[in-house]
Image (tube, grey):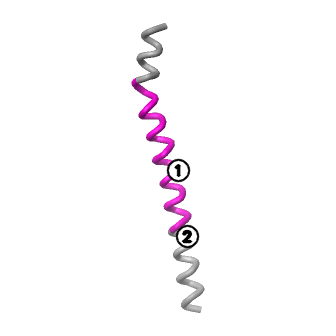
Amino acid sequence: MLKLYQIDHFTRPFKTHHIVHIASYISYQELIQIHNHNQAKSHG
């Protein structure tokens, strides 16, 4: 039981960081798409 908790305690920060990284990557891609779309609009 204790061993399992220690493993979970060790891996949880990595899991959380991975989720945050994926989320920030997705929002970054969305920002690029919006930016490209706005540029295309302004150039007519």
Residue 26 position, x and y percent, is 53, 56
Q: Is residue 25 above or below residue 40?
A: above
Q: Secondary structure at mark 1?
A: helix
Magenta segment: does it hold 34? Answer: no
Q: Is residue 26 above or below residue 19?
A: below
Q: Main secondary structure of the magenta part?
A: helix
Q: Is residue 9 above or below residue 38?
A: above
User: How crowded is the residue under tag 2: few (<14 C-alpha within 10 Å), some, or many (20+)?
Assistant: few
Tell me which corner region of the image, top left, top right, bottom left or bottom right, holds residue 40.
Answer: bottom right
Q: Is residue 26 above or below residue 3?
A: below
Numbered label attached to residue 23: 1
Tell me which corner region of the image, top left, top right, bottom left or bottom right, holds residue 10.
Answer: top left
Name the residue at 54% across, 91% down: 43
Dot 2 and dot 1 residues touching (CB under 8 Å): no
Residue 18 position, x and y percent, is 46, 41
Q: Which three-letter amino acid code belongs to the residue tagged 2? A: Gln
Seen from this angle, which residue lies furthest bottom?
44
Residue 16 position, x and y percent, is 48, 37
Q: Nearer the viewer, mark 2 or mark 1?
A: 1
Please name whichever residue, 44 or 14, is drawn nearer the observer in this view of the structure. Answer: 14
Residue at the spot of label 2:
33
Name the residue at 53% across, 50% down: 23
Q: Which three-letter amino acid code belongs to the residue tagged 1? A: Ala
Residue 4 relative to residue 41: left or right? left
Magenta segment: does it hold 27? Answer: yes
* Residue range (magenta): 10-31
Residue 10 relative to residue 34: left or right? left
Task: Pick the quarter of the image with the C terminus.
Answer: bottom right
Name the residue at 56% across, 64% down: 30
